[in-house]
Image (spheres, coloured by chain):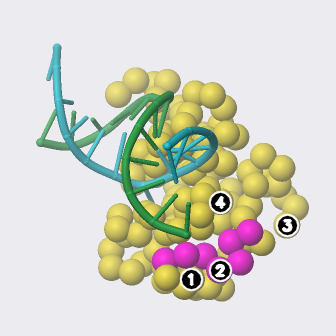
Chain colours: A yellow, B cyan, C green
Amino acid sequence: MSNDLEELYMKIWELVASIPYGRVTTYGAIATTIGSKASARFVGIALSRCYLAPFYVPAHRVVNRNGLLTGRHHFPGNQMQELLENENVVIIDNQVVNFKELFWNPMIESSDKI
DNA sequence: TACTTGACAAAAG
DNA sequence: CCTTTTGCCAAGT
């Protein structure tokens, strides 16, 4: 695997790791923040391989642009939803309630604020 | 090497 | 409002 690719993975993983507790973001937003090198699809790939990350990646805080938990089948059982609920995120019908309010924009809020 | 898949998204019909 | 199309790009087979 090329180093360029690994660097891109690292950027994505780091960004995901910086998502505040109890907040969520989207694949597209991450891709936009990383730059033109990335695409929303690529972010999905990076997360599917987040077990390669040298640190913990809270992938459950990343949902699709509708607030839908499309990545849930990559977690054992119902863990994605359970993890979010542990962070006081309410989920109904595989969708994040208050998604608009809980959405964390990595471009604007990227590390502090809330 | 070629074809298919997919943790996406935006636009068109 | 729902389905299809298109762009995207690495990974798996």
Q: Nearer the viewer, mark 3 or mark 1?
A: 1
Q: Which residue is mark 1?
A: A91
Query: Tag 2's secondary structure?
Result: loop
Hey, which quadrant is residue C5 in on the image?
A: top left
**Which of marks 1 and 3 precedes in the sequence?**
1
Q: Is residue A46 magenta?
A: no
Q: Earlier in the sequence, mark 4 or mark 1?
A: 4
Q: Residue at x 40, y 24 (%)?
A: A2
Q: Position of residue A20 (x, y in %)?
A: 71, 66
Nearer-N-terminus badge (1/2): 1
Please provide the residue range marked out in magenta: A94-100
Q: Which mark is residue A25?
A: 4
In this figure, which residue is indicated by the disc labeled 2? A97
Earlier sequence position, callout 4 versus callout 2:
4
Tell me how far mark 3 sits from mark 1, CA to CA.
21 Å
The answer to whether residue A17 is visible is: no
| Residue A99 lies in the magenta stretch | yes
Mark 3 = which residue? A114
Q: At numbered mark 4, what does the secondary structure look like: helix, strand or loop?
A: strand
Q: CA separation, marks 4 and 2?
A: 13 Å
The amino acid type, in three-letter code, at marker 4 is: Thr
